[in-house]
Image (cartoon, coloured by chain):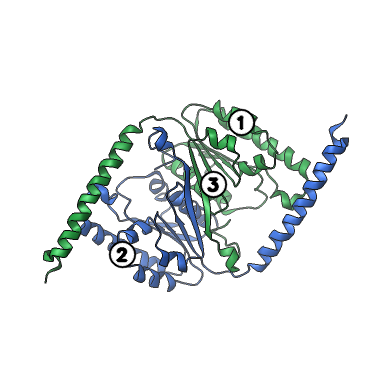
Chain colours: A blue, B green
Amino acid sequence: MNQENDPETQALNERHRVRMERKKAIIDASIAAADKAIGIIIVNTGNGKGKSSSGLGMVIRAMGHGMKVGVVQFIKGAMETGEERFLRRFPDEVQFHAMGEGYTWNTQNRERDIEKAQLAWEQARTFLADPSIGLVLLDELNIALKYRYLDVDVVIQDLLARPAMQHVVITGRGAPQELIDIADTVTDMTVVKHAFKAGIGAQAGTEW
Amino acid sequence: MNQENDPETQALNERHRVRMERKKAIIDASIAAADKAIGIIIVNTGNGKGKSSSGLGMVIRAMGHGMKVGVVQFIKGAMETGEERFLRRFPDEVQFHAMGEGYTWNTQNRERDIEKAQLAWEQARTFLADPSIGLVLLDELNIALKYRYLDVDVVIQDLLARPAMQHVVITGRGAPQELIDIADTVTDMTVVKHAFKAGIGAQAGTEW
């Protein structure tokens, strides 16, 4: 029997069509309702993978739309990562600052960490005051907040004072509740499975 | 009193140093134990943001390390997204195929969706057979599996037969259990808060 004429297949296709029609109506309605075009604050937190790489992906999207981008890497930055090397190829589109000196468990010096985090925040603040920058990525900012290297109230004040159309993406595990409260979109990257646990090393291209 | 000489601050700094020293020892040990350098399968699933953008970020990392990359966009692709526009600037580094015709709730034609998904899988298979490609991004593959546009057993067989050093990143909500079972790293992007719900529209640069 020709599959196209099979009544079971036809019924399946018809059920699919009806279900998708309903889904389209729901999605269209929610898109129509969501019509405020303003800059948003996105927070990627949690213990799983994808927080920084998702922020990096949003940088690429913004560049694809012709936006200028500012990136500040908190805490990380001693390591020459693949993304840093890549983004430095576009000096007219991306301003990149990696002001940390590796994770604090490598330095074990709290006062130096605080000083570096505060210098990095000064850089972030200049991006947050510049309306020509369409997207600001504050990579691993949550770590600096978690260790109280930065004052969360100061950070929030500067975030809220930014240009109306500017997007901000903030990454790092342990986002403080105060930041979640003022964010528009918050995602918790939850570990289901991690290759490290299976004895697989950090891989160029996927982890750094 | 000079803050550096304040006994409370000194004690805080010392506790921090000891805690970080312990942390460093644990992390060093787990990195030393994780020394298998092989290609891994990463799955980004869940209802939250960041699945595709994280995949895109890994593409950028891989490019930063001089790898060649293959991208197949399943289901999506009718829309000219920022990332597609950006990646097409690097034809020597990235092979990009967007074979879907928009989400299925826009087409409402199951047979055409199946045909498109299978053509896309043919393209994926050529990447998965090519050892010169260091990373393959199969964007929204999970959706095609969820709607049974593709046979999960065939997909898994092709994934497992790929070159030993090749990484694969698979995105989309609703990853099937069979895929999770063979993956190395699986992250569930969990919604904490979403700007859509607050009436904010999809924004160029962050959503597409």
Instruction: Identify residue type, mark 1.
Output: Arg
Examine the rendered structure and indicate whether residue A108 appears above or below residue B204: above
Question: What residue is shown with label 2?
Answer: A150
Q: Is residue B71 left or right of residue B17?
A: right
Where's residue A169, x and y in %?
A: 46, 60
Secondary structure under tag 1 reads helix
Examine the rendered structure and indicate whether residue A75 appears above or below residue A122: above
Camera-side residue of A22 and A57: A22
The chain under label 3 reads B
Q: Which residue is located at x 36 percent, y 64 percent? A: A124
Residue B161 visible, this orientation = yes
Question: What residue is shown with label 3?
Answer: B87
The chain under label 2 reads A
Examine the rendered structure and indicate whether residue A164 appears above or below residue A85: below
Q: Which residue is located at x 73 percent, y 39 percent? A: B114
Residue A73 visible, this orientation = no
Among the two numbered marks 1 and 3 on one chain, the one whose residue lies closer to the N terminus? 3
Question: What residue is shown with label 1?
Answer: B125
Secondary structure under tag 3 reads helix
Q: Are marks 1 and 2 on the same chain?
A: no
